[in-house]
Every structure is written in C-alpha cells, then in structure tokens.
C-alpha cells in the first residue's frame, strides 16, 4: 500500500510533491463529466514522469491486433479510447526560465480534489534556478452542467522579484496513446485557426473518421482588471497558441482564465463541428467563470443528494466510498445510451477504455439505485442494440441459428480483445448480460422490458449455451470444456462450476421469460418468434434437457463446489502463507507458476453464489466461502467487494469490514501497485454494493425491498439513500437501531429483519437491532 494522501471526508489531498508518485496522483486526481475526462496533468510544462491523458467518450481507434501467431476467430483490432487534444496547457516563462516542477525547487505543494463540488486545485511555491520564487494557484473543472466545457483559473504571484512573465495558453492535438502499437499517432488535422486569444484545432481519426474539435479562449487579469495587451499567436500542424508578456511586481497577482470547448462528431454534424464548438465556447465565455463554477457545483450537489453514503467515525472509510461514487459519476451519467463504462473510465488507457462484463455485473446495481430509471435502462439498451454484433461474434467462432456471444471487450458490439484465453474462453460474460436483465426487472418491476427487448437477448444467449455444451458419454452428463472462469489465474479448464451454473441459469430464465411474454403479450411474442425463427417446443425442450443433465464438479468430502475439474490436484495453500515480498503474485511469479497454483485472482465459485444466493442455503454459502476466500489473493479489483458482501451475509463482520476497506481504498492506497495506470472505475460500484448490499443487507425478496443491516464496530453510524420503484428511501444504521425514512409521496411496504413494515409518505420507522430474528 502507498498511504501518502491526507484523510479527509470530502477531499483527496496530497501534501508535498513526490515525482515518484506523480503518475499515481495523475490517476487519482482525474476529473470528468461523463462525456469527457482528463488525468491530473499539470497546466504548465512538466518534463518529469507523466502520462498525458485527455479523453472524449465514444471516440476510439481500432488499433491493429498484435499477437505472436494468428488464430481463426481473432479480432482484427484492439479498440482503444484515444488520447485527444491537450486543452489544459498554459506555458509559463519567467525571463527565459520555464516553470517546470521537474527542474524547479518545490518549496510547497498541495493538490486537492474537492469531491463535493467537483473541482481540482493545486497550490504550490517553487524556486527557479535563478532563485526567483513563484506561487501558483490553479483550479480547473469539466462542467457537469455543460458537458463540452472545461475551465481553468490559473493565478501566478512573484514572491521575491519584479520581472517579466510570458503566459502561453495553447491546444496541442499532436498526441499519442502510451500503448499505441508501433508508436502510431491516431489523429490527422483537418484545419486550425488562431486569432487574438481564441483558437481551435479540428482533427479526425485516421480510421473510423471520428471528428473532434478543441477550441480555447482566455483572458488575463492584473490588478483585478483585464489586461489589454495584444497577444502573439502561433500555430503549426495540430497546435495553436496565444501568448502575452507582462511585467509583474513582487506579491502581485496575475490570473489566467482559460475556457475550452471540446466537441465531437458523435453529437454534431461534421460540417458544422467547428462552428458549433466555437458557439459552445462563446456561451461559456459569456457566462463567465463564476457562473460556470456555480452551475457545476449545483450539478454535483444534486448527484450527492441522490447517492451519498455518510459514515460517521471512520474517515478512511468515508473518504473511500465518496471517492468511488465521485469517480463513477465522473465516468458515466447515463445521458447517452451509446456510451458505456470503461474499466479505467477517463483516468488512464489500460484496457483500451472498452466495455467489459463489469458494467452488467457491478455497475448496474449502483445506477439502478442512485439515478433516474432511464440511466440503468440505457445500460441494458446498449447491449440490446449490439445484439446483432453479438450474433456475428458467435458466427465467427462457428455458432449458428442466432446464437449470440457478447464480446469480452468492445466499443461497438464487435469483439476486440486480443488474448486467446479471454477472446475464446471467458464466455461467462454472456451470463452477466442475462443476469443484468433479470436484476433490472427484479429491481424496477418493469417486466415490460422483457417484452420489448429482454427476451430477444435471452433467447440468443441461451442458444449459445445450448451449442457450447457437449454430452459426455463417460459422465453421462453435459459438460462445458475449454473455458476460463472469472478467476483468470486459470486458463483452458473444463467444467468451470460458475460457467456451467450461469449457463443453466440463463436457459432457465430464458424459459421463464418466454412463458411470461407469451402469456402477457401474445401478439408481441408471435412477432418475436417469427423474427428470430424461434422453434419454441424444440429449443425449450433442449434447454430443459441440458439443465436437468448438466455436470457440476463437486468435492463430496468437503461438500464444496469445485472451481473446475482437477482443482484439488493442485498443491493446496492459503494466501496468508505467501511471503509478503511475493505479493501481488502477478508482478512476481511467472505465468506458468500462477497457472499451476491454487491461488484465485477473484471470486469464481463465489461469484455464482453471490449472483444466485437465494438458491443456496446459508450452510452451503459458508462452506464454499470458508474454502475459497482463504485461497483468494484479491489481485483483481472486482474481488474484494463480492467477498465483502458474502462475508456480511454470513455474519463474518470483521472480514466484511476489512475487505470493504480494501475495495474502497484500492486505488487511494494503491493496493495492487497499478494506480499509475488509472483508477479501477467499474469495481468502484462494488464498493457501493459492499455498503448497501453488504452492511445494509439490501435484497429484493418476493418482490419486496428487504434489509438486514449490521454496523461495523469501527463506525458510529452510516446512512445511504436508494431509489426503488418510484420511492426514495433513506436508511440510517446506528449501533442501536435502523431508521428507514420514506421520502416519497406514496406508501412504502418493505421488510427489515424479517418484519413486514409499512411506512407512510414522508414518515420514518425505527427498528431496534435486538428485534432481528435470532438475536
């Protein structure tokens, strides 16, 4: 762990500048607004170790796949979100000396991410090689109210000299991705222009023809008034700048207000992109810094009002959950159904910024409970609109008849992952898509989604599973061979328990959904049957036969489900027996050694028990948890949250708390030594689940909202708010009682500690912990 940040309930604070940690901080202090985002790079020049990162949602590049040898079925490309125009740049020159924290002596440095109000601020004091001292205060934000606007306020103070300063705001579109194959640059300039303080660069991607225009304007104040000096402009291919030189006196402030607009052809016609970008910029300039900041703060205030979790008595836990919620909303707002949630969001380039199964398995519950209903619905529609691509993905691997295999990694529905054990074998992702439909319908009660969209997806996925199994004469059972389960420290295994189980569950749910739609909307059902050529009797009978005859590996002696065939042939060790110097093992061991070990990267069997908890008794959950959790090294960001929730369900309160803290502070404390590559955005939703579903015990049982909370001993109280079927519900848990408030205008029926309760509109009920059944 790297615990170098100050603990604070609403802020992420870095005191002092350590160049060795700069790339970690660039990730942690990233800002975004759902449409675009940016790493916490410095406005002024920095010649030290940095990862430049400015990203525009939905704009990507199909980079040529690089593999040692080609296999049939490999995707032609690996999609990656593109590093776009650097709009934040403001070069500072003091009488021939560049302001550069890699060269200057840093006397004071404080970086602060204000999560409550959504802005990034740095205050620092440096001494130049000439001994001139400068103080800088820089504040910037990407507007949550105007998703194509970014703003910077940059104040310079000369501390011990009178001299001349040259200030050069610029836009640089001559960028590349760190992980670009062959160091290729992906942008071509269309045109650019700079006049006085205003300029733009308009560029397009070399493939797919995405267009992005980045424009800037600025003004400078001195003595509290705007400076009237005519600037010097400069331009070259993919770059524009505008410079002003001023005399500055000791202890006098000079402030740069820089406004930027970044627009793409996703939202504007290409022929009007420059014009529209400049109009967005004009409106921002006319509104001014203070109004834009106030709008931005109000937008964040609304989001926190809907989603905040309040923890009293544990600042580290409080900071962690708010950081997770903050980054989730910076990444995805749900306003555009074409967009999804990349594992790193806008904080880095790893994983290409593509969509993974993480969205359905981890993020959907967060957005269902904390945002307007259309947000979660848009996440499902994203997959529905990619159904034809999923069918084509399956066809490339030899599947027929409308069978669909959703991609492990995608931007447009097409598989674009270039590692064979992921592309071909990690097929359990299909189950996560199906489970998301079930989860959405169960939570919202919107069964009409099955009629409109859901059943079509479920049938296509069920068709895939029905073809992916084969009948083993030796076992007299159906088996699924050659897979990789959620535990990616195992490749090419047979009969991964979770994969076999989620396959059968999907077919079960597809049959249930087909029955519902045929009964409740027979005309729609008939239309769908004809559209997808669904042979109901034959296909459903086949699914039922597979379900009834599926093979599941089990260890009868220990009464646990086996992760896959042969798992117990491995040398059995516990994660606690590993030397600390060898953790994480993925950074110290060979891949061969990892594959032969019993160690588990993340929940695998336990992932299935988490999804299908209501189908297994508590003893079964406990036996499997006690067997697998000690063998789990939690080297996937998706791991601690699932284990924390199950631990809470099983009454393992200390373990639930420890694993919660690990998931909540995974990036803040850099548990896995990889925060420099970007934050783990999709697993952050699991942190929210750890509180609400873990400590709060929230479930939907028999169509009712239920709670079975406990409070970690480290906390005085905690409180959260959820939206459920047109109700807004707040819950506060103390060591004495649980207080549920119905903040809606409709009566609320729910269950707390197995007690059925009714809460009138705008009323609260308190339930004492000792009233819990069995206590």
Image (tube, rainbow, N blue to C red):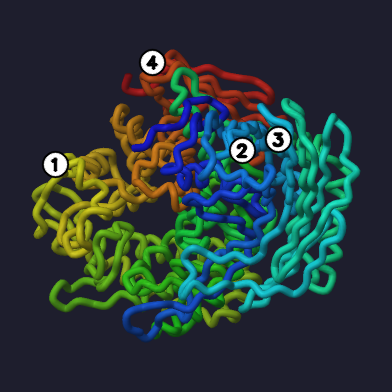
State the residue position of label 3: 156
Residue 156: x and y in percent read 70, 35
- Vertically, is 165 above or below 107? below
In this view, the residue in front, 539 or 355, is: 355
Near mark 4 (Cα within 10 A), the count class, few <14, some 14-19 or many ≥20, is few
Residue indicated by mark 1: 577
Residue 341 location, x and y as percent? 55, 56
Residue 253 in view (yes/no): yes
Q: Which mark is residue 723?
A: 2
Among the two numbered marks 4 and 2 on one chain, the one whose residue lies closer to the N terminus: 2
Mark 1 neighbour density, 10 Å: few (under 14) some (14–19) many (20 or more): few
Q: Which mark is residue 770?
A: 4
Q: Earlier in the sequence, mark 1 or mark 2?
A: 1
Do labels 1 and 3 touch, CB within 8 Å? Answer: no
Could you tell me how many numbered marks the image carries?
Answer: 4
What is the spatial separation of the Cα atoms under label 1 and label 4, in whole angstroms? 39 Å
């Amino acid at each position: 762990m790297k615990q170098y940040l100050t603990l604070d309930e609403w802020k992420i604070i870095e005191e002092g500048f350590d160049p060795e940690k700069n790339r970690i901080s660039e990730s942690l202090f990233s800002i975004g607004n759902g449409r675009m985002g940016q790493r916490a790079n410095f406005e002024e020049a920095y010649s030290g170790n940095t990862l430049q990162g400015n990203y525009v949602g939905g704009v990507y590049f199909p980079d040529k796949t690089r593999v040692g040898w080609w296999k049939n079925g490999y995707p032609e490309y690996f999609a990656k979100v593109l590093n776009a125009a650097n709009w934040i740049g403001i070069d500072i020159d003091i009488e021939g000396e560049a302001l550069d924290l890699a060269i200057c002596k840093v006397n004071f440095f404080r970086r602060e991410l204000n999560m409550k109000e959504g802005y990034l601020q740095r205050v620092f004091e440096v001494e130049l090689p000439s001994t001139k001292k400068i103080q800088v205060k820089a504040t910037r934000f990407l507007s949550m109210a105007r998703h194509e606007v970014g703003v910077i306020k940059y104040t310079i103070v000369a501390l011990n000299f009178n001299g001349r300063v040259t200030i050069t705001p610029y836009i640089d579109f001559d960028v590349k991705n760190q992980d670009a194959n062959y160091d290729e640059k992906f942008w071509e300039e269309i045109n650019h222009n700079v006049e006085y303080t205003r300029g733009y660069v308009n560029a397009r991607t070399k493939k797919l023809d995405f267009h992005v225009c980045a424009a800037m304007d600025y003004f400078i104040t001195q003595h509290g008034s705007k400076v009237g000096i005519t600037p010097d402009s400069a331009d070259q291919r993919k770059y524009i700048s505008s410079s002003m030189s001023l005399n500055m006196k000791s202890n006098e402030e000079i402030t740069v207000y820089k406004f930027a607009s970044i627009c793409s052809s996703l939202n504007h016609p290409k022929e009007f992109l420059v014009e529209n970008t400049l109009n967005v910029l004009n409106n921002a300039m006319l509104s001014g810094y203070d109004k834009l900041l106030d709008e931005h703060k109000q937008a964040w205030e609304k989001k926190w009002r809907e989603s905040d979790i309040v923890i009293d008595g544990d600042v580290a836990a409080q900071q962690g959950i708010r950081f997770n919620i903050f980054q989730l909303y910076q990444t995805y707002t749900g306003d555009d159904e074409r967009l999804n949630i990349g594992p790193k969001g806008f904080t880095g380039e790893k994983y290409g910024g593509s969509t993974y199964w993480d969205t359905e398995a981890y993020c959907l519950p967060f957005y269902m409970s904390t945002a307007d209903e259309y947000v979660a619905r848009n996440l499902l529609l994203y997959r529905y609109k990619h159904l034809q691509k999923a069918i084509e993905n399956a066809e490339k691997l030899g599947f027929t008849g409308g069978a669909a295999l959703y991609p492990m990694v995608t931007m447009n529905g097409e598989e674009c992952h270039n590692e064979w054990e992921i592309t071909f074998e990690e097929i359990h992702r299909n189950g996560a898509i199906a489970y998301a439909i079930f989860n959405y319908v169960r939570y919202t009660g919107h069964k009409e989604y099955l009629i409109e969209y859901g059943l079509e997806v479920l049938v296509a996925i069920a068709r895939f599973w029905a073809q992916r199994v084969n009948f083993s004469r030796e076992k007299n059972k159906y088996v699924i061979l050659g897979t990789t389960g959620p535990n990616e420290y195992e490749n090419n295994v047979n009969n991964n328990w979770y994969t076999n189980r989620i396959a059968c569950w999907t077919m079960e749910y597809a049959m249930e959904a087909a029955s519902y739609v045929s009964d409740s909307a027979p005309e729609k059902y008939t239309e769908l049957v004809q559209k997808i050529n669904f042979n109901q009797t034959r296909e459903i009978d086949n699914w039922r036969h597979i379900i009834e005859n599926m093979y599941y590996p089990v260890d009868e002696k220990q009464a646990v489900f086996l992760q896959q065939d042969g798992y117990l042939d491995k040398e059995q060790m516990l994660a606690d027996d590993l030397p600390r110097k060898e953790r994480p093992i993925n950074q110290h061991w060979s891949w061969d050694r990892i594959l032969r070990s019993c160690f588990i990267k993340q929940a695998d069997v336990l992932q299935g028990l988490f999804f299908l908890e209501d189908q297994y008794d508590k003893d079964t959950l406990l036996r499997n948890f006690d067997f697998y959790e000690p063998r789990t090294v939690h080297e996937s960001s998706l791991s601690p949250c699932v284990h924390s929730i199950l631990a809470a369900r099983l009454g393992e309160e200390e373990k639930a708390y420890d694993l919660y803290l690990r998931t909540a502070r995974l990036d803040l404390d850099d548990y896995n030594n990889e925060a420099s590559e970007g934050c783990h955005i999709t697993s952050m939703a699991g942190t929210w689940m750890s509180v609400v579903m873990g400590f709060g015990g929230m479930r939907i049982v028999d169509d009712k909202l239920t709670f079975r909370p406990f409070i970690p001993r480290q906390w005085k109280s905690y409180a959260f708010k959820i939206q459920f079927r047109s109700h807004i519900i707040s819950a506060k848990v103390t060591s004495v009682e649980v207080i549920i408030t119905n903040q809606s205008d409709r009566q609320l029926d729910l269950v707390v500690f197995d007690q059925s309760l009714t809460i009138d509109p705008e009323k609260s009920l308190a339930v004492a912990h000792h009233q819990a059944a069995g206590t």
